[in-house]
Image: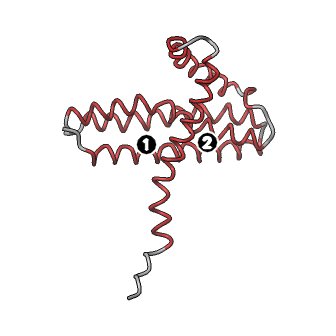
Amino acid sequence: MIRLAHLKRRLGQYAALWVGGFLVSGTAILVGATITDIMAATDMVLPVLMVGVVLGLGAGVAASLLSGETVGTKFVVLLLAVLLALPLLWAPVSAAVAIAFFADRSIEYSEAYAAFQIGVSRVLFPISQAIGDGDLFGWVWTAFQWVSSIVGFASALTNVWPLLRRLLGPEPAPEL
């Protein structure tokens, strides 16, 4: 038996962690860019934020595994954590990519970004080799960026939309 309420709560926490990683990373890089170069700020911020989001994800998984939930629920939480780990790590990195884009800088000069890309390549390259030839890797990397960004946007939207509805007030009563 799988408890959907528990999964929904964990996915909501995942969404909050994704949004938090993106916003804190972006803010820290922008503040750091006032003191030093954008790439140096990125190299200082990204490792700390990536460790933070991994610890947050791990805490949620550990809480689920130690809870009184069913084995099926625990298995699904663990499976979702494995599937969503890379998109979650993309959150702080995507903020750095966006800032570098608007600053008209190349993010590839950041050591932290390069290390992230190499780490993801070690995961995605064998998958692309198993599916096809080496030319497939560029497509897989682009697909990873898009899918991770869409997952993050959907996560943000699911967290922000109820807040916006509450701020806008209740729906007007229909006139009879």
Please identify the residue farthest to the right as the structure is shown.
Answer: 104
Percent of width and height locating residue 55: 44, 34
> Callout 1: helix, strand or loop?
helix
Q: Assign the N terminus to one quadrant of the image.
A: top left
> Callout 2: helix, strand or loop?
helix
Q: Assign the C terminus to one quadrant of the image.
A: bottom left
Residue 14, disc: 1
Amino acid under disc 1: Tyr
- Nearer the N terminus, badge 2 or badge 1? 1
Residue 112, disc: none
In front of the other: label 2 or label 1? 1
- Front residue (pair 128, 56): 128
Name the image quarter holding residue 74: top left
Residue drawn at point x = 50 percent, y = 47 percent = 154
- Front residue (pair 131, 166): 131
Residue drawn at point x = 42 percent, y = 30 percent = 83
In the depicted structure, whether residue 101 falls above or below residue 170: above
Please identify the residue farthest to the bottom as the structure is shown.
Answer: 176
In the depicted structure, whether residue 140 falls above or below residue 162: above
Task: Please indicate whether residue 66 sits to the left or right of residue 157 in the image.
Answer: left
Characterize the local packing of mark 1: few (<14), some (14-19) or many (20 or more) Cα atoms within 10 angstroms.
many
Percent of width and height locating residue 13: 41, 46
Residue 25, disc: 2
